[in-house]
Image (tube, coloured by chain):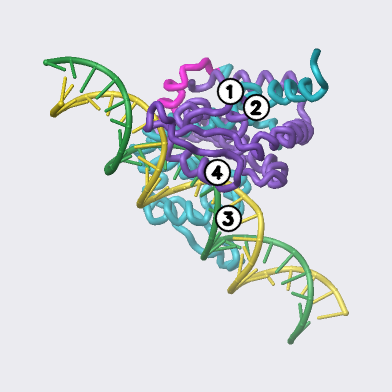
Chain colours: A cyan, B purple, C yellow, D green
Amino acid sequence: MTSDADKALDKAVEVLRLDRQLCFALYSAANRVTRLYRPLLDALGLTYPQYLAMLVLWEHSPRTVGEMGQALDLESSTLTPLLKRLESAGLIARSRDPDDERRVIISLTDAGDAMRDQALGVAEQFFCKLDTPMPELVDLRERLKRLAV
Amino acid sequence: MTSDADKALDKAVEVLRLDRQLCFALYSAANRVTRLYRPLLDALGLTYPQYLAMLVLWEHSPRTVGEMGQALDLESSTLTPLLKRLESAGLIARSRDPDDERRVIISLTDAGDAMRDQALGVAEQFFCKLDTPMPELVDLRERLKRLAV
DNA sequence: AACGATTTAATCGTGCGCGATATAACTTCA
DNA sequence: TGAAGTTATATCGCGCACGATTAAATCGTT
C-alpha cells in the first residue's frame, strides 16, 4: 500500500529529473556550444559574446549601444564593459552622438571590418564541428527563436 | 556587373546575419529562460545554476563533487564555489570521503530535502510561463540533448 | 617500500549577465 | 523658462563558467 505522501514524493522525483528539464538541456547545450566556439574564436582574440556583438556590427554599422542591446537582448551593464574591451582591442570606436549626447555610437574600425572574412571561416568550422545536417539545425534554431519570447 | 570581391562580401553578409546563427538563438534563449526562472527562484533564495545543482541532489544524494560535475557538465572551478554557497545557505553538507580523502561528498540537509516540494511548484509555474504545448517542449529538449554532445 | 603518474578538488584571474543605482542629456508642459 | 519627468549610458556588486595551476591523496610498477 502506498500513502498519498509517497505518491507526491514519487511525482516530485519524476518531474524534477534533470534529464526531463528543458532548462537544463538548454543551459547545457549553450555551455557546450560556447566551449566549441572557444578554440575557433581564440584565433581572432574574441570571446563568444564579443563575437555576437561583432556579428551585429558586421550586419550594420554604426549603431548605438541601445540598438545593439535590443539586437542582442542585453542590458547596458553587460554591453558597456564588453564594448570597451572591443574598443581597446582596436575593433570598434565609441563616440557620442552629436544630435543626442546621451547616445553612444559604436562603429567598426578598419581592423574590425577586416575581421569579417575570418569570421566566415569560424562559422564554417563551427558547422563542421557540429556534424549535424543543416535542416536539423535550421529547425532547432527556429524552435529556439519561438521559445519564451 | 558584380566583382568576385562583391560576391564574397554578399555571401559573408548573408551567412553571418544574427538571425541565421544557431549560436545566437541558443545563447539568447538560454538568457531568456534564466530571466524567466529568476523571480520564481528568488522565492527559494536560489540562483538558476544552484537550482540545477539541487535537481541533481534531489535525484540522488549523497554524491561526490566529481559526480555532480559529470551530471551538470561543469568544472570543479565552477562547482566548488557554488556548492560552498549552498552550504552556507544550509541546504547541503560537505564532507571528505573517509575511503578516499580526495573526494568530497555532498549531501542534502533536511532543509535542502524539504525544498524539493517548493521546487515542484517552480517547475509548474515555469511551464505556465512558457505557454508552449508539452510535446513541442519535449521535442525541443531532445533536439538540444543531441546537439554538440 | 618507494617513486613517478594519475586522480580529485580547490584556487586564481578574466569576462560575462544582470539588478540596483547613478548621472547626464533630453522632453514636457505649466 | 524652468522644474519635473523620461531616456541613454555607465557603475557597482554578485554569481557564474572556465582555463591554468596547485596541492594532496591514491595508484601502479618495480
Res. B145 visible in picture: yes
Q: Residue at x 68, y 42 (%)?
A: B41
Read off the residue under disc 2.
A22
Identified at 53% across, 58% down, the residue is A105
A91 and A20: which is toward the camera: A20
Q: Is the C terminus of chain A in the top left, top right, bottom left or bottom right quadrant?
A: top right
Q: Amino acid at mark 4?
A: Glu
**Do the residues bearing badges 1 and 2 touch, measured as CB atoms within 8 Å?**
yes
Disc 4 designates what residue?
B87
Label at residue B144: 1
Circle 4 marks a residue in which chain?
A: B
Q: Earlier in the sequence, mark 3 or mark 2?
A: 2
| Mark closest to the chain's N terminus, 1 or 4 | 4
Discs 1/4, front: 4
Q: What's the magenta region?
A: A119-134
Q: Is residue A106 left or right of residue B19?
A: left
**A119 versus C4 height, above or below:** below
**Pointer 2 local density, CA inside 10 Å: few below 14, some 14–19, many at least 20:** many
Q: Nearer the viewer, mark 1 or mark 2?
A: 2
Overall secondary structure of the magenta section:
helix
Q: How much space separates mark 1 and mark 4, taking CA atoms?
A: 31 Å
Q: Position of residue A141 (x, y in %)?
A: 60, 27
Amino acid on which disc 2 is placed: Leu
Task: Determine the chain carrying the residue at label 1.
Answer: B
Across and down, in percent, residue A106 comes to 50, 55
| Magenta stretch encompasses residue B55 | no
CA gap between label 2 and label 4 equals: 26 Å
Q: Residues within 10 Å of mark 1 (few under 14, many from 20)?
A: many
Same-subunit check for callouts 4 and 3: no
Residue linked to disc 3: A76
Q: Quadrant of residue D23?
A: top left
Image vertical order of residue A138 relative to residue C13, above or below:
above
